[in-house]
Image (cartoon, rainbow, N blue to C red):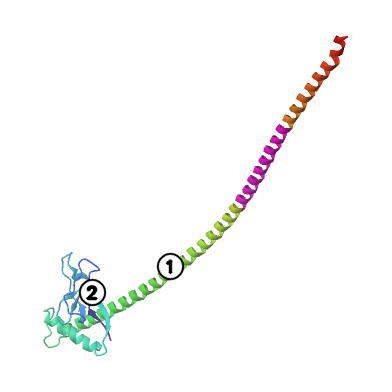
Amino acid sequence: MKVLAATRRTQGAREDDCCWADEEELVMSGFECDTATCACQRSLFGVETLRATTTFMIVERADLTPAALETLVLRALGAGGWISTAGGSDAALKLARSLVREIERQIRTMELQARKAERYRAVKAELKEKELAFAFLQREAFNEVITGQESQLAGVENRLAEHLAALHGKEAEGEALQLSLMETDREIGVQQENVYQRRAAHRIVCVWPSRST
């Protein structure tokens, strides 16, 4: 049958934890004192040592039966001075049985809490997995958007480079044209100077004979 046994494995989860009972000693519900700060309100007591523990676990004991557990509890109640077991009184037996039922109730509660905790861990793990999957999908979507924007940016940069190259070509053509115009203007100036000089020489030739006559 399933019973509760003391353990030190989970000691320290709360500041007022204690385990004075022997490791894996069978435990039962005890009696609470009036001290508000005492841990007895959440403690169980060893059926052999009668010492308290705030940490306990469910164990399977094939060698125990409900009747045998009642006997152990009844003996612990008598050893602790809580009741008189002389003559096997019905009151003592009823109390022992009620404590065994309380142990069974606590086991059912602990098993229910364990199942809830297991479901919570499973749901939490599933939620975490879905969050990771969603984050991955978001990242993939963002990467696609970024890749598209980078591609558009590269296209714009390429077109800008083409425009700049064309502009530089036009500037080079303009500079070459300007140089050509300057050269042409210089040649025109030279030709004009030559024409001017020839006209001046022609006027001198034409005027000179009339004076000698």
Q: Badge 1: few (under 14), some or many (20 or more) residues near its Cα, within 10 Å? A: few
Quadrant containing the N terminus in the rendered view: bottom left
Q: Residue at x 74, y 27 (%)?
A: 190
Residue sitting at 71 percent across and 33 percent down?
Answer: 183
Say left or right for 132 vs 204: left
Left/right placement of residue 58 relative to residue 185 reads left
* For marks 1 and 2 on the same chain, the one whose residue lies earlier in the sequence: 2
Q: At 76% from the left edge and 24% from the top edge, which residue is drawn?
A: 193
Residues at marks 1 and 2 touching, judged by CB atoms closer than 8 Å: no
- What kind of residue is marked 2? Thr
* x, y percent for residue 125: 41, 70
SS for tag 2?
loop
C-alpha span from label 1 to label 2: 31 Å
Viewport quadrant of the C terminus: top right
Magenta residue span: 155-183
Outermost residue to the right:
213
Q: Secondary structure at mark 1?
A: helix
Q: Nearer the viewer, residue 3 or 66?
A: 3
Q: Quadrant of residue 192?
A: top right
How many numbered marks appear? 2
Q: Which mark is residue 128?
A: 1
Q: Which residue is mark 2?
A: 55
- Residue 177 is inside the magenta segment: yes
Where residue 60 sits in the image (x, y, percent)? Answer: 28, 85
Q: Position of residue 92 (x, y in %)?
A: 16, 83
Foreground residue among 104 and 87: 104
